[in-house]
Image (tube, rainbow, N blue to C red):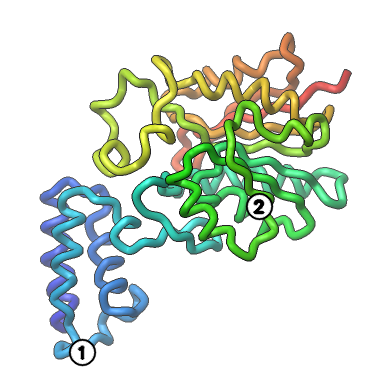
């Protein structure tokens, strides 16, 4: 075992002792980041090339600073995004939400489907859809100026129509013209603050996390916005907490003009997102 791999083993134990959920992964990611190699190339780093700054990054991760804040990057589907303080770090579970949306859009008989991403944050969802559905017209909105500093970096050179504003009032010019509305909104109940992982509670912006006493305030608002934006037959896809399975589909009722409201599991088989179709008059 070379020096770096030995240090990674020690770092893994330190991170585990600190309660980091994925200590081996994070120890290796930080080693690769500091030494400028891929994780699978750690064994190739010469002992003489070991960089002691590795232990500075481990100390930061021990304090539960997000891995993505330390490296300045987050991976999402086929994207590498810039992230840091002020913007919500995209999570792996959201990838399955986007995967469902991509399949739904591809199944539509629409040459250039129009997609709206509400509460875009880093831009992960909008950019993934623009990349994987090449003829789509993607629009995204974000309220926070702090988040938008990162969104603009990530969307530079992309064809996404990015706007700043309130998701509930956005895109009046697109009313009735949208094929798919997607959102990963804040959905944590205010009463659950103390149970939120330190990486999110202490580093992600509160605006991207909490939404009323039951966590569903913004989702209720997005229901009306999605109904306004979508054409008849258009689809809404909205992420929620695994503890909210069954609650969100009931917001998209027939009385409000929806059909086929349903919940869907993530890769860990936990309720993760709800979908509904705007009913045809």
Which quadrant of the rendered structure holds the C terminus?
Answer: top right
Mark 2 sits on what residue?
Answer: 129
- Mark 2 crowd level (few <14, some 14–19, many ≥20, 10 Å Cα): many
Residue at which label 1 appears: 46
Residue occupying the point 69% across, 28% down: 226
Query: The N terminus is located in which quarter?
Result: bottom left
Q: Determine whether, in the image, residue 234 is placed left or right of residue 119.
A: right
In this picture, residue 257 sits left or right of residue 18 = right
Q: Is residue 42 above or below residue 171?
A: below
Q: Which residue occupies 42% across, 33% down?
A: 207
Counting other residues with Cα less than 10 Å from the Cα at mark 1, is it few (<14), some (14-19), or many (20 or more)? few
Secondary structure type for disc 2: helix
Whether residue 40 is visible to the viewer of this picture, yes or no, is: yes
Residue at image x 31%, y 71%? 33
Q: Is residue 10 left or right of residue 210?
A: left
**Residue at mark 2 to residue at mark 1: CA–CA distance:** 41 Å
């Amino acid at each position: 075992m070379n020096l770096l791999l030995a240090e990674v083993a020690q770092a893994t134990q330190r991170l585990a002792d600190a309660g980091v959920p994925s200590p081996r992964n994070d120890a290796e990611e930080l080693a690769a980041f500091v030494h400028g190699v891929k994780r699978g190339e750690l064994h190739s780093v010469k002992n003489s090339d070991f960089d002691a700054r590795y232990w500075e990054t481990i100390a930061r991760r021990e304090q539960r600073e997000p891995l993505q804040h330390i490296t300045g990057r987050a991976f999402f589907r086929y994207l590498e995004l810039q992230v840091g303080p002020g913007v919500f770090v995209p999570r792996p579970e959201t990838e399955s939400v986007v995967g469902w949306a991509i399949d739904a859009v591809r199944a539509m008989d629409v040459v250039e489907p129009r997609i709206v991403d509400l509460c875009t944050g880093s831009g992960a969802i909008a950019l993934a859809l623009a990349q994987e559905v090449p003829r789509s017209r993607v629009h995204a909105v974000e309220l926070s100026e702090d988040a938008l500093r990162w969104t603009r970096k990530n969307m530079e050179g992309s064809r996404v129509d990015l706007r700043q504003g309130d998701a509930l009032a956005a895109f009046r010019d697109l009313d009735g013209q949208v094929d798919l509305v997607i959102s990963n909104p804040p959905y944590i109940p205010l009463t659950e603050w103390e149970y939120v992982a330190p990486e999110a509670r202490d580093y992600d912006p509160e605006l991207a996390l909490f939404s009323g006493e039951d966590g569903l305030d913004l989702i209720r608002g997005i229901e009306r916005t999605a109904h306004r934006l979508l054409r008849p037959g258009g689809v809404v896809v909205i992420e929620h907490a695994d503890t909210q399975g069954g609650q969100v589909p009931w917001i998209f009722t027939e009385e409000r003009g929806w059909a086929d409201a349903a919940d869907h599991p993530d890769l860990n088989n936990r309720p993760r997102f709800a979908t509904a179709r705007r009913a045809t008059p």
